[in-house]
């Protein structure tokens, strides 16, 4: 794809994205539009399955599936043996969390830390593990601008042992970026295992698991990476993996040594599954390689500029309030319109050929509490969006008040 000195050729990207011709897609925090190349990768493999058989087609793609792990590792700053592709971010988090619990990492009376940006499926997983083990969940307060309060984290770590910290890089419901590297330093010094929710950051922001210092990181393929639905990423640090005993094992994740014994495979391989959507995984490989070819820094720069431009337009519109907070922000823009329900704004946008979504409290119940809105419109531009498309959204928002 054509590039100029670290910039993105937006017209070329739009031409390579079939959906751009028919819709203004500003719901990339939900599921981004795939490229024609990603679409073709998926469809071509489905044809091979129909023509040759599912097992045989998978054998034909074995080298590309192996290369996918290498691409994901480069994306995250990890080693290939530390990453696996899964079915979703939630699947990645659930299996790693239960693996930690089954490995003895969460005992009765243990303390589990979360931030206020926690996503529902991650928090629900912690609740379930807590109910099974007798562990308690403690919520680290936010700073006045909405991000994780590092001073409060330090105080919490000094009050007694902590079994696990589960923090969020970017919340699903507003566009602030948490100080995950600084949190990682504090957790390393305290010897606390660190799970990172990178679902809304991978693909739009640089994510370097070494710099962040996390032991586990999870993400999805369908959002900023522009991959197929039904794909997710799991990073497990090599020397942390032996502490995890994931549930639901099979021969790909463990070795059946004799009638009474099995041995989990090394590293992240213990999370491998045999029955996977090979076509979707291959499509994810195409999407990840495309992201790497553009450069995550270039993507982050453009996404950030588009999002800040949208915030400025919305803040200038009468009766519109933006609710992202934070000091560093990203491609998620959340707002409300006086006298108009967020759902009505989203429907008006859809009627004009513009995709946005609505964030509701059950997605992020710890943070979406009064005096903050408990529901808001979420717009999330990607690098293939244009200023003209943002103008169209603002026009619809202004018309919705009339």
Image (cartoon, grey):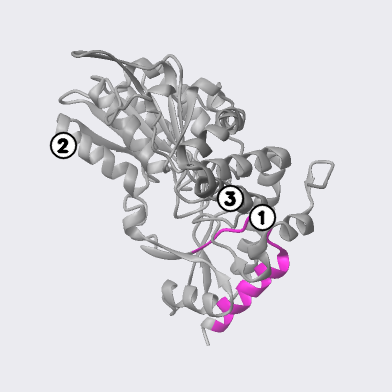
Marker disc for residue 389: none
Relative to 219, say whether 69 is above or below.
above
Residue 217 seen: yes
Badge 1: few (under 14), some or many (20 or more) residues near its Cα, within 10 Å? few
Label 2 SS: helix
Left or right of 7 on screen, residue 391: left
Return the residue at label 2: 131
**Residue 326 appears at what percent x and percent y?**
52, 48
Q: Label 2 vs label 3: CA separation?
A: 36 Å
Return the residue at label 3: 226
Check if residue 389 falls in the magenta segment. Answer: yes
Check if residue 371 falls in the magenta segment. Answer: no
User: Magenta residues?
Assistant: 378-399
Is the residue under label 3 in contact with that under label 2 (CB below 8 Å)?
A: no
Return the residue at label 1: 36
Q: Label 1 vs label 3: CA separation?
A: 11 Å
Out of 18 and 320, give the one closest to the viewer.
18
Relative to 157, say whether 298 is above or below.
below
Q: Earlier in the sequence, mark 1 or mark 3?
A: 1
Is the residue under label 3 in contact with that under label 1 (CB below 8 Å)?
A: no
Q: Nearer the viewer, mark 1 or mark 3?
A: 1
């Amino acid at each position: 794809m054509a590039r100029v000195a670290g910039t993105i050729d937006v017209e070329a990207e739009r031409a390579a994205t079939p959906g751009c011709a028919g819709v203004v897609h500003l719901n990339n925090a939900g599921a981004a539009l795939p490229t024609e190349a990603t679409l073709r990768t998926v469809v071509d493999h489905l044809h091979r399955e129909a023509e040759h058989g599912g097992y045989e087609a998978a054998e034909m793609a074995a080298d590309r599936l192996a290369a996918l792990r290498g691409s994901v590792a480069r994306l995250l700053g990890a080693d290939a043996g530390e990453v696996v592709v899964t079915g979703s971010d939630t699947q990645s988090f659930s299996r790693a969390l239960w693996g930690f619990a089954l490995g003895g990492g969460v005992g009765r009376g243990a303390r589990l830390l979360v931030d206020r940006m926690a996503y529902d499926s991650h928090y629900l997983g912690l609740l379930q593990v807590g109910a099974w083990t007798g562990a308690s969940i403690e919520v680290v307060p936010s700073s006045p601008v909405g991000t994780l309060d590092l001073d409060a984290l330090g105080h919490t770590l000094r009050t007694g042992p902590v079994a696990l910290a589960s923090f969020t890089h970017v919340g699903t419901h507003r566009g602030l970026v948490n100080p995950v590297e600084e949190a990682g330093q504090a957790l390393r010094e305290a010897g606390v295992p660190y799970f990172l929710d990178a679902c809304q950051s991978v693909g739009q922001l640089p994510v370097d698991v070494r710099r962040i210092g996390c032991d586990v990181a999870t993400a999805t393929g369908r959002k900023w990476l522009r991959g197929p639905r039904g794909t997710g990423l799991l990073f497990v640090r090599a020397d942390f993996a032996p502490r995890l005993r994931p549930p639901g094992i099979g021969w790909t994740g463990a070795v059946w040594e004799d009638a009474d014994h099995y041995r989990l495979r090394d590293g992240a391989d213990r999370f491998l599954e045999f029955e996977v959507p090979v076509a979707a995984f291959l499509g994810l490989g195409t999407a990840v390689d495309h992201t790497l070819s553009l450069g995550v820094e270039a993507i982050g720069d453009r996404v950030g500029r588009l999002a800040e431009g949208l915030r400025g337009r919305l803040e200038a519109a009468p009766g519109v309030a933006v609710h992202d907070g934070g000091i560093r922000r990203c491609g998620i823009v959340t707002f409300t319109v006086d006298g108009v329900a967020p759902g009505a704004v989203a429907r008006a946008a859809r009627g004009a050929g513009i995709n946005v979504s609505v964030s509701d409290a059950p997605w992020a119940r710890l943070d979406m509490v009064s005096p903050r809105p408990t529901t808001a419109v979420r717009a999330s531009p990607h690098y293939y969006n244009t200023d003209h498309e943002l103008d169209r959204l603002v026009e619809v928002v202004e018309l919705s008040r009339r």
